[in-house]
Image: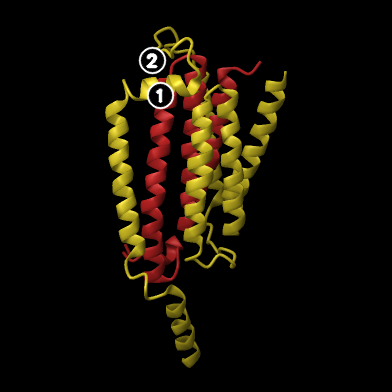
Chain colours: A red, B yellow
Amino acid sequence: MIGLNHYLVLSGLLFAIGLVGVLRRKNLLMLFFATEIILNAANVAFAAISHYYNDLSGQMFAFFIIAVAASEVAIGLGLLILLYKKHGTLNLDDLASMKG
Amino acid sequence: MFELIAFYTISVLTIGLFLVTVLSKNVLYAMTALAAGMSLISGYFFMLGADFLGVVQLIVYVGAVMALYAFGMMFFDVTRDIKEKNTNGAVVFIIAGSVAVMLTMIFSMPLGINSIMTLVQPEVNATNPEAVGLVLFTKYLVPFEVAAVMLLVAMIGGIILAGKKMDDSLTSTEDDKIIDTEGL
């Protein structure tokens, strides 16, 4: 049978995939995609714990995470469009304006 | 038995699709793989009995967020492959791998199992959406309202950020640039 540990290990794997994306990608849009993966991994863990401990708090937190992710995308895409209009690129290396 | 098959099939598929998202060079491939992975994630929620959460995942993530990305994609040049300078990729994989091992060790730790207690018990005879509604509008009413205000702020912010100077088009400025470089 599938237990809580199966879901938690799966969630850890998805989180690690998202982390690879955040650390490795240099394109801002790809960084956004990786963030979505990380948020989804957290949601899976919350839903699994909520099911196996028979407690609805986990699902509530997952709902609020989804709300936060939606507003993050709305604001973030607006900022990305502004950046692209200004610089013509979304590459982080080209966007670095403070040379230190 | 069927749960076992479903769990392993969906988990292999989601991990593969998310790997495509993270490693692909083409934005369109990455976005399509992300959308497919997100819709498969709702399968976990249905297996876990969180029906309402699964439906919300489908509507909000696969519907709204992916449509937003698709609209945003129209502003960017997505036909080109992304060129990225990847310095020391091995370090990244070592860090992420050790974080994965660490998370697995934390999750399998038997610490404090006995001290976990249920805070919000679902109603006995209620279906999942009913139980969620009862809890959301009693115990979590204030966070719910705060989330509503946050979504309103995000909506206004998005409109102002992306909608300002919408009339000077992006493509015409790009054409000017091309003409400039040709002139030089």
**Can you tell which quarter of the image residue A61 is in?**
top left
Q: Is residue B172 above or below residue A31?
A: below
Q: Which chain does tag 1 point to?
A: B
* Residue at horizontal 47 percent and vertical 76 percent from the top: B171
Percent across and percent down for residue B89 are 55, 51
- Residue that appears at 58% across and 68% down: B80
Say the numbered circle drawn on residue B143: none
Residue with the mark numbered 2 = B120
Is residue B140 toward the left or the right of residue A52 in the image? Answer: left
Instruction: Report which quarter residue A93 is drawn in.
Output: bottom left
Q: Secondary structure at mark 1?
A: helix
Q: Amino acid at mark 1?
A: Gly
Q: Is residue B72 above or below residue A6?
A: below
Residue lying at the far bottom in this picture: please name it. B183
Within 10 Å of disc 2 (Cα), the crowding (few <14, some 14-19, many 20+) is some
Q: Residues within 10 Å of mark 1 (few under 14, many from 20)?
A: few
Q: What's the mark number on residue B133?
A: 1
Image quarter hosting the N terminus of chain A: top right
Picture residue at 61% right of the left edge, 37% below the top: B40
In the picture provided, is A74 more to the left or to the right than A30?
Answer: left
| Residue closest to the eye, B146 or B124 | B124
- Between the C-alphas of marks 1 and 2, the distance is 13 Å
In the depicted structure, whether residue B176 falls above or below residue A48: below
Q: Is residue A49 visible?
A: no
